[in-house]
Amino acid sequence: MEKKIIFWVLSLSLVAIALAILLPGGRQVESDPKLPWEMHLTSQGALEVFDLTLGTSTLNDARQVFQMQGELNLFIDHTGSPALEAYFERVFLSGLRADFILVLDADNELLSRLYDRGSRISRTSQSTHKVELNSEDQVLATGLPIKLINYIPYANLDEQLVTSRFGQPAEKITETETGVKHWIYPEDGISIGLNPDGKELIQYMPLDEIEPLTDRIEENNKRYEETLKQQG
């Protein structure tokens, strides 16, 4: 009888260990993990990450990968430039939790029509307005391709961790005003923003968008430094 009890307890222990391995944090181990440092360029030179290919995969594809609908809105910045963005909060992929902001690829004519047909306009900051799309345009947007992926991890990233996963960047640029360090990987289409006072941001973009990004950071730095000189 005692041997049977010991065998039963041992069997339960082995089952528990097996479940712990297969279900870390209550989630099954994926045969095809979708990790932020596992990306590659397709034969056409497009960046593929999280099973999504920039310029090809659509908002509907992202919803299937993330298993949620997300929130879709049109944003107008201080320059008047529109951007169609889909926000996915608390997405779990391969055991990692993050927020995603996808910028959809739409020409100016379509963005203008979406703005005109918007159901409600609100202000999100002093310089940015948010336009809610009507129901028909919400459906239309599901077929638009993804232009950029913004990945905001819940875990804090330090330089050592980033280096171990992504390698050394080709360029490092620090924002003078905020202190955010941008690690640039031009051959991969990646920019990683290391924020000393907030969340980190990994941006996945077409290769030809890297240089304009670095130019904008440098221009903002010059503008901020000139402002400080004028105030001093």
Image: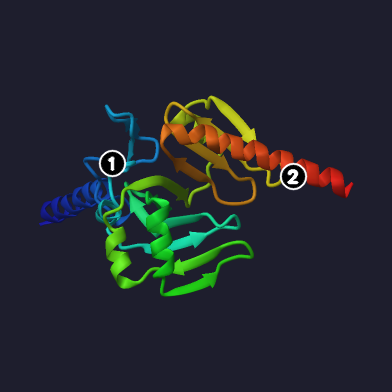
Three-letter amino acid code at the position of disc 2: Tyr
For the N terminus, the quadrant is bottom left
The x, y position of residue 230, in whole percent, is: 86, 46
Asked whether, in this view, residue 110 is left or right of residue 142, the answer is: right
Give the mark nearer the N terminus: 2 vs 1.
1
The x, y position of residue 85, in whole percent, is: 42, 57
Taking depth in this image into account, of 190 and 89 the one nearest to the observer is 190
Taking depth in this image into account, of 27 and 72 the one nearest to the observer is 72
Taking depth in this image into account, of 59 and 168 the one nearest to the observer is 59
Three-letter amino acid code at the position of disc 1: Pro
Q: Nearer the viewer, mark 2 or mark 1?
A: 2
**Residue bearing the label numbered 1:** 33
Distance in Å between CA atoms under marks 2 and 1: 42 Å
Vertical comparison of 122 with 101: above or below: below
Element at badge 2? helix
Vertical comparison of 206 with 170: above or below: below
User: Farthest residue toward the front?
Assistant: 109
Residue at image position (41%, 36%) is 206
**Residue bearing the label numbered 2:** 224
Residue 175 visible, this orientation: no
Asked whether, in this view, residue 35 is left or right of residue 159, the answer is: left
Residue at image position (23%, 51%) is 19
Residue at image position (33%, 49%) is 93
The x, y position of residue 15, in whole percent, is: 19, 51
The x, y position of residue 172, in whole percent, is: 60, 30
